[in-house]
Every structure is written in C-alpha cells, then in structure tokens.
Image (tube, coloured by chain):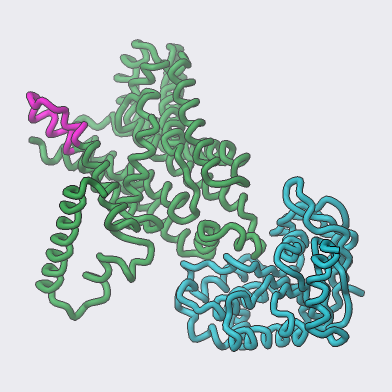
Chain colours: A cyan, B green
Amino acid sequence: MYVLEVKNLTAGYEKLRIVRNINLALEKGEVLSILGPNGAGKSTLLNAIFGIARIFEGKIILNSKEITGKKPYEIARLGIGYTPQIQNVFPNLTVEENLELSAFKRNGVDVKKEIESIFNLFPEIERRRKNLAKTLSGGERQMLAMARALISRPSVLLLDEPTAGLSPKATSVLLKKVKDIIELNVSVILVEQNVTKALETSNRVAVLVGGEFVYQGNANELTREDIEKMFFGEKIKQEL
Amino acid sequence: MDIIGFLISWITLFSIYSILSISLNLEAGYTGISNFGKAAFYGIGAFIAAVVSLLAFLTVSGLSYPLYSLETIVAMGTLSKQNPVLNIIVFLFTLALAFVISGVAGYLVSYPTLRVGPAFLGITVLSFGELLRIFLRNFQPTGGTYGLAGIPHPFAFVQDPTARDLAFMLIALTLLIAIYLFSERLVNSPYGRLMKSVREDEVASLCLGKDVPKIKAQVLFIGSGMAGIAGALLAYYMGSINPDIFVPSLTFEVWAMVIFGGSANNKGALLGAGVITFLNRASVVLNFMFQNLPVDVNYIRWMLVGLLIVATLLFKPEGLIPEDTRSSFVWSLFGEQKTVSFKERTEEVRKRVKLYVKKLISWFMMGGE
C-alpha cells in the first residue's frame, strides 16, 4: 500500500497549467527525488500536493484518503509536512519558538518531549535554541525548517531544494539528515538540483522536464550523465 | 490652571487611547494586519453605548422621546441622577455589548478580504469606516450630523464634578490595566507565537497546518472588540458624540501612537498613547490660555505628531520600545546593566539625545534628504 499517490495530476496557478499528467506513488520510508531543470515545475508539483497550487485535473491520495482540493492547513493536519525552498522559518522567533509553533494545538502531545526528541535528531540547532532564527546559518535554517516540519509527525515530508545555496559540506550534512529521517518511517519527496547528491540519497528518482515526467525509476539504475541527457533532451528535440 | 482637572482628563483620555493603541498593536504589530479602519470600530462602540443607554433610561422611565431630541437631553439630566444602580448596570451592559458588536463587525467586514493581501484588507476597512460615518451623518434616528447628546454618565449621581470625573478615570484606568494584562498574556502564550508567525510569513504558517485567515479573523474580532470598549468609554466621558469624531485621521493618530511607541510591544503602545494624548490635552489647555495667538495650537499639535512620526521612522523605525526589549534603548539603559551607576546611565541618555537632535538638525539642513 502506498503512503501517497498522485494520479493524472494537472496543476498550476490561475489559468496556467504548469505540470501535466503526473502519476507517482510513494512507499513507506522511501525517498523519491524529483529532478529537473529550472522552470520544469518541481516546486509547483509540491505546492499542488500541499494544496497551495491550483489543481485542474487528477487526484491526490494520502494514506488511502483523498486530499485533492483540501486546504493547506487541513493537509498538514492529515500528515504531510512541507518545507518550502525559501521563507521556511520565522526569522524573528527563536529556534525553540519555531518548534513550539509546530507542536501547538496537537492534543495529548508533550511539547517539551517532542522538542527534545527533535533536538536529538538535529543537535546542530540545539545549541542555538534560544537564538533568533534570523541569526542561523543557511544550513542551520534548513535544519530548523526540516525539524519544524517533522515535529508534527507527518507520514510524508516534502522538501523543496533544501540544499540550495549551501556549501558542499553543509549539503552533505543535510542530506545525511534525510537518510536519518526515513528511519522514523517518514516518506520523503525531495526536490533537488544537485543530481549526484540526490542519486546518493534517494531510493527512486523522477525526472520532470517541461511539466511532465520523462523518467521514473530506481536511483541506482541511473548515472548523473543519464539524467543530464534527459535535462537537455527537450532542448535537443526542439533544435531538431 | 486646574492641574487636577488636567491630569484627570489626560489620564482618562490616555486610558481610552491606550486601549485603542493596544488593540491596533495586537492586529498590526503582532499579527501584521493593516487595519486602517480603527475609527469605524471605535465609532460603533461609541454609538452602541449612546443608543442603548439612552433607550434604556427612556424605556425604564416610560418616556418615548426620539433619541436626538432636546426633550431627551433635558430628561436625561434628571433621570441619570435618580438611580445609581441603573447607571452602573447600563454602563457595564453597554461595555459588553460594544465589545461584542464591534468585534463581530470587525470579523464580518474583514472576512472576505482576509485571503488576499494586506493592502486589500486595509483599503476595505478604511472604506467601511468612511461609508459608516457618511451613513450615520444621514441617519436621523441617531441624530444625523448632530449625533447624540445627554448620554448618561455612569457616575452622574455623584454631586461633585471632580469626584465624578475621578471615579470615571479610575474605571477607565482599571479597564486599561485589565486589557493590558490580557494582551500581555495573549501575546506571550502559544497563541501569541501563532500571531507572530502569521505576521512573519503566511505561507510558512500554512505549511505548519495553521488556518491563517481564521487566526486573522479571530485577532480582528478581539482588536475591534477592544476598540468598541474604548468607543463606549469615550461616549460616556464626552456625554455626546457625532459621526465626525470618527474620521480616518483618528485611525492614523492611533497608528502614530503604535509607530512612535514601538510596534509589537504593548509598553510601546502605552508610551505612544501617553505622549500623543498629552500633546492633545496640552494643546487644548494652551489654546484656552493663549486665545489671541495668530495660529491655532491644535494645528501645531498635528504638526508635532507628524514630526514625531517622521523622526521616529527616520531614526528609530522600530519605535522607542521595540519588540525585543532586550535590545531596546530603554532596556540597555535600565534593564541589563544593573552595575552601571545612575550617573553613567543619565550621561548615556544625554549623549543619545544629543546625537538624535544633531541627526534631526542635519536632516533639516539637508532639506529632508
């Protein structure tokens, strides 16, 4: 049984259809990387799954329950965590306050315990717990954003380019965290520009070009060169 | 000059305006809602108090005069002194009613625009305020442009006018303290963090499963309700109200209080209200004392308020007491540095004030560039 299924999804903004006929299925504890050139529609796909973008056609099913057309706050409560590429933390709140916000209003949850268990996963931000989020480094910010999404115990985590603008070292640390996250039985959809790192981190990859999937398969069956060819495939076709 | 009378009127107005500035601070400072229609909800509270209290007294006495008539004003002069229990009951009931009706109005007016940008909301409530004012100017049952007079003072049965005003001042101050404590509690609770998260980033809040439009609507209900209480207090304090009291410039005076005192800090809202209401009262007294001046002192007050806003935005855009008090000017002088002597602190104040004055003068010399 799949945790998340997307069937024949066409989505975009206002009248513009950006992604078309998207089909994907995510298993429990799996990392699916979505790769593609800039403007391919990767972030739009995540926004559509999370209820931010407009859905024209298709269905989204989470844990056997249809969530198509639901509002973002309802989808979050049903078990999807989303970490957007930018604006993913509250800069003028402390690290601890950022985490407390996610835990707020969940019945029967000991907020303090939850925060401590998240700090075990992200010790890098524990020492900054009393600092304002705006004082964190880029990597620490991304870790805080991931920690904040995880504290609500989602079954699926959507990560939109978490390594954008990070140093190679910070990128490695952060992607190592993604591997740690799946140990918690969380499935991850990772949108990533760094092809090599994405292949190392994920179980499966899907390549999105021009708003449509051109490939879906196991990560170990592909090389960086194969994917780069797919990225340029569209362009070559157009030239021909 | 009657110093006691001046202080009583200043503290009463300070209490009323502080309630308004705290309510705006909850909306704009903590939640990022641009409420440019504060005067409307303040006006609703004032008219609710006026209409309901006049109706209550006339009904209890078996009179059926129109609310805005001379007969009503004359009758209220006697009726309001006869039954102290009725005065207090009507006063408390209208305060509660003003809170609920203004709050519901805030919620309803803003709800359709909560899902769009802050500018739409700001313009919608500003327009609503103006529409309401123009409607009331033409609505004869509430006196049209003349408004309503003879609103029964809750302590009208007290003979001595100073004691009466003092009692009202204490009530207004008590309400201010209660609202201040409630707001402090609210903004320091998990709900307060939620409000700040909406202000910081609506999309990020949505991603955490927060119902952003609902949170904004709830804050607008609370803020508008508080403005309604302030309006009711104003109606009782003045004894008469008319629609033209609630012009948009009143909204911007409250914004000035929040900007000057410090956004997202209730102490800042109090400081702003204190300074601006002092200027307000002082201009009334000065106008009375120097009647032959070629310029109306009221205009000088407006210029001073404008100057305060410009100077604050130029040199201390976060206000005198900013959100994070640990980094504020006041905190740096009197908060953390317990070991620094009073003399050293005052020296620091002198230096900082001198620096700000220098900056202001150089700004003027440069022609405002």
Q: Position of residue B176 (x, y in %)?
A: 35, 48
The residue positioned farthest toward the right in the image shown: A1
Residue B63 in percent (x, y) is at: 43, 13
Give the main secondary structure, helix, strand or loop, of the magenta stretch. Answer: helix
The quadrant in which residue B45 appears is top left
Residue at x 21%, y 37% (from the top left corner): B301
x, y percentage for residue A24?
Answer: 87, 69
Query: Which quadrant is home to the C terminus of chain A?
Result: bottom right
Residues shaded magenta: B282-300
Q: Who's the residue at 27% across and 75% down the image? A: B336
Q: Residue at x 12, y 64 (%)?
A: B350
Q: Residue at x 30, y 51 (%)?
A: B260
Left or right: where B9 falls relative to A110: left
Quadrant of the rendering where the N terminus of chain A is positioned: bottom right
A117 or B81: which is nearer to us?
Answer: A117
Residue B353 left/right relative to B58: left
Q: Is residue B284 magenta?
A: yes
- Residue B305 lies, with reference to residue B344, above or below; the image says above
Q: Where residue B89 appears, x then y in whole percent? A: 42, 35
Position of residue B101 relative to residue B187, above or below, is above
Answer whether residue A121 is visible to the viewer in this image: no
Residue B73 falls in which quadrant of the image? top left
